[in-house]
């Protein structure tokens, strides 16, 4: 994952250098080749929509995600306030559970969400998913010649393919909450998940900061495996370069 993020940052640097070179050659009225939000970093609060009540009540802590995208911005020649952007990036999500385990390696036809209120369990337990995504945005910039001091908005979608799904538990406890040992257990499997994710996106902000939302429009899990569950991410975007 770290290697992928480093590649994305390096690519954004190349795009930024090229965009800055173009900027030196253009005058104020010519914003067709402007530098425009080539790198987007997003920190989100994550929520599962549609999950079963028996699972939802075990979701504890601050579920969060981190997304990073490298984008190309193409301005409409006849309307420089508008542009279309597309790119490549990685989206991650971490959902935390209390007194529950998820058996990703189960041979059953349904994904077991195990209630461990009266059994040994991990003090810290989470499910992490990661996707390689292609985002597409229709963008509006109120002052295209001064992007870093302008109101901005965008709507779009993104399509992704799953890179990884794993659970991670730390610090095993007995049923009364006393720690048994401090080992860490990690299990990887994508067999219960849809390999493709489709999501609608929107964001609005000022300068290099904006609020964003992303809603998954297809089921996170394969049919019949678990409740029809969609991922909702809401958070802050830092964009620029």
Image (cartoon, rainbow, N blue to C red):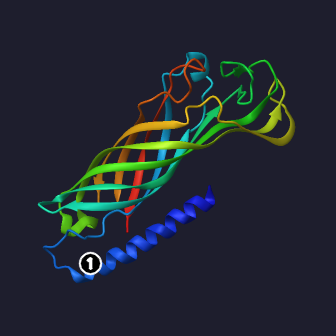
Give above or below for 134 relative to 6: above
As drawn, which residue projects farthest toward the right?
180
Identify the residue shown where x is 55% and y is 18%.
52
Q: Position of residue 4 (x, y in %)?
A: 58, 59
Residue 73 image-quadrant placement? bottom left
Q: Residue at x 36, y 76 (%)?
A: 18
Query: The C terminus is located in which quarter?
Result: bottom left
Choose between 50 and 211: the one closer to the eye.
50
Horizontal side of residue 70 vs 95, given as left or right: left
**At which x and y percent is residue 217?**
41, 31
Provide residue 36's location: percent of width, then percent of height.
31, 65
| Circle 1 crowding by C-alpha within 10 Å: few under 14, some 14–19, many from 20 | some
- Reply above or below: 206 against 163: below
Q: Toward which corner of the image does residue 56 lie, by quadrant?
A: top right
Q: Which one is nearer the viewer's eye here, 193 or 66?
A: 193
Residue placed most toward the observer, 24 or 96: 24
Residue, disc 1? 23
């Amino acid at each position: 994952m770290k290697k992928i993020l480093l590649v994305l940052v390096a690519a954004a640097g190349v795009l930024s250098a090229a965009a800055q070179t173009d900027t030196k050659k253009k005058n104020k009225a010519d914003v067709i080749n402007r530098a425009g939000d080539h790198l987007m970093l997003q920190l989100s609060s994550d929520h599962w929509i549609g999950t079963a009540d028996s699972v939802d009540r075990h979701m504890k802590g601050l579920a969060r995600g981190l997304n990073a995208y490298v984008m190309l911005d193409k301005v409409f020649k006849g309307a420089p306030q508008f542009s279309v952007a597309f790119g490549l990036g990685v989206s991650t999500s971490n959902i935390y559970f209390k007194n529950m385990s998820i058996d990703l390696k189960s041979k059953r036809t349904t994904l077991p969400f195990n209630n461990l209120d009266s059994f040994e369990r991990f003090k810290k337990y989470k499910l992490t998913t990661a996707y390689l995504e292609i985002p597409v945005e229709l963008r509006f910039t109120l002052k295209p010649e001064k992007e870093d001091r302008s109101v901005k908005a965008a709507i779009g979608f993104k399509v992704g393919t799953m890179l990884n799904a794993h659970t991670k538990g730390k610090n095993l406890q007995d049923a009364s909450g006393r720690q048994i040992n401090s080992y860490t257990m990690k299990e990887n499997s994508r067999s219960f998940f849809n390999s493709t994710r489709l999501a609608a996106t929107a964001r609005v902000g000022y300068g290099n900061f904006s609020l964003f939302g992303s809603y998954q429009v297809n089921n996170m899990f394969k049919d019949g495996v678990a409740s029809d569950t969609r991922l909702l991410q809401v958070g802050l975007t830092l964009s620029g370069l």
